[in-house]
Image (cartoon, helix red, strand yellow):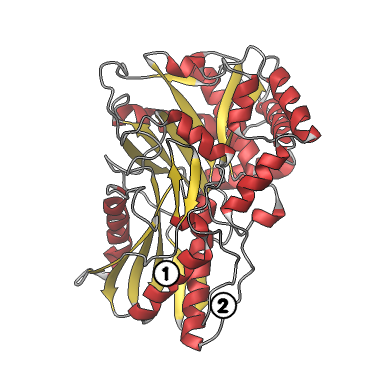
Amino acid sequence: MTVSETAHAPAGERIPLSVQQEFLCMWDKGDDMGPFGPRYHIVDGWRIGGELDLDTLRAALDDVVARHEALRTTVVRDDRYQRILPPSPVPLTVLDLPGVDPSLRDLRTEELLNDIAAGTISVRELPLLRAVLGRFDERDAVLALIAHHTAADAWSMQLIMRDLAACYGARLAGAAPDLPEPAQYREYAAWQRERLSAASTATARDYWRERLRDARALALPTDRLRSQEPEFSTAWYRFSYGPELRTALTGVAARTRSSPFMVLLAAFAVFVHRTIGTTDVVVPTFTPGRDQAQFQDAVGSFFNCLPLRVDLSGCATFADVVARTRSACLSAYSREIPLAQVLGEAPELMSLTAVDGLASCVFQVIQTPHMMERDRVGDLEFSAVRRRMLAQTVGSDIPDGTLLCLELDSTGDLIGELGYSSNLYDKSTAMRIVAELGEVLRDVLGAPAAPLGT
């Protein structure tokens, strides 16, 4: 079997960075605390049913690295360029997990993923992908993939697993994998730079300059001063809001012609108003950053962050807040540009997040493609591990502050996780934020037309 015949960049060529990579370099201090640190990674897991061939799995992992240049690209931070290196083998660790009762294997899977997320991956050691296979028995296993976040985002992880399964099946069949030809991240960087001078980009910058005039991004009070505890790690608190709230959420979304994200963001804006009193809520939120079809199948760090501004003044009901939020989202998404360019038009936007005693809060609803749910490759069955309830004291790093992630689980639940800088926040504060947001959700989703209250 041969891997995709994508044209490779000449070895050693100095390739310009994407705007996202440039932005990361701006925050880089040359140490292990920033975006090039060893815990700035992403970890995903899949349960695998069936008898797995280890040699074929190793070869298929190497196929994926050959197929996607981003997994073997190094960012030269001092001189600000990226360099693509030849493919190299993906480290695969195999762990035997014998004697685990089948009823406890989901829990053991979560424990394994937490252990892996507490580990590190060096940005200096290519490829920027690792794999761990935990085997309960010959026909039940969990496969974890770990990638450095400079090389892959959440969307990319699903693509990597999709391609891994396809390459695995093709190797067993002695055929080429049935996969679309991928664009490469360097092509995205080149397209992005051409776009910088486009009239549409200038129009979008004008929009953000006016939209964010006098705005300040959300900053929540911390439990401790940053100056007292400068070194941070990220802890994660995980939770479930239950199927009843999921049902109420989808009902409100349908009636208001909104996406679940819009409704959840509206509820979060109400939570912020009730917590700190402001009616001018500016919430940073992650987007896939893949509005161009040619990059839908590309692996890389595409994700973007948009500051969504929702004005709650004059809103009598939650339905009013949803309408305001829907309008804000639609206008922002149609003018999306990289966060670095947005900040160029609103240089004071993040000023509160730098105040000692305050920290940023980013809101996200996880929506990724190719989410495997009992997918089959030969006699193997793959299912993504999405429902995780175990908290952890050390995990994948986030920028300074908090990151609240919600997800509509395939089981019909509304689940989530809150990452928080443990030098700034206690676990009890994370639990309180989650509980109080849950109260707001039950209040507003249960009666969206009732008076909003305080």
Find numbered disc 1 in the image and state the secondary structure of the residue it sits on.
Answer: helix
At 62% across and 44% down in the image, what residue appears?
A: 289
**Residue with the most extreme right position:** 199
Q: Amino acid at mark 1?
A: Leu
Compared with 115, 307 (above or below) is above
- Residue at label 2? 177
Residue 166 coordinates in the image, percent (x, y): 53, 74
Q: Amino acid at mark 2?
A: Pro
CA neighbours of label 1 inside 10 A, class few (<14), some (14 to 19), many (20+):
many
Q: Are marks 2 and 1 in contact (CB under 8 Å)?
A: no
Q: Which mark is residue 61?
A: 1
Residue 74 coordinates in the image, percent (x, y): 43, 49
At 26% across and 21% down in the image, what residue appears?
A: 229
Q: As drawn, is 222 to the left or to the right of 188?
A: left
Residue 325 coordinates in the image, percent (x, y): 68, 30
Residue 173 coordinates in the image, percent (x, y): 51, 87
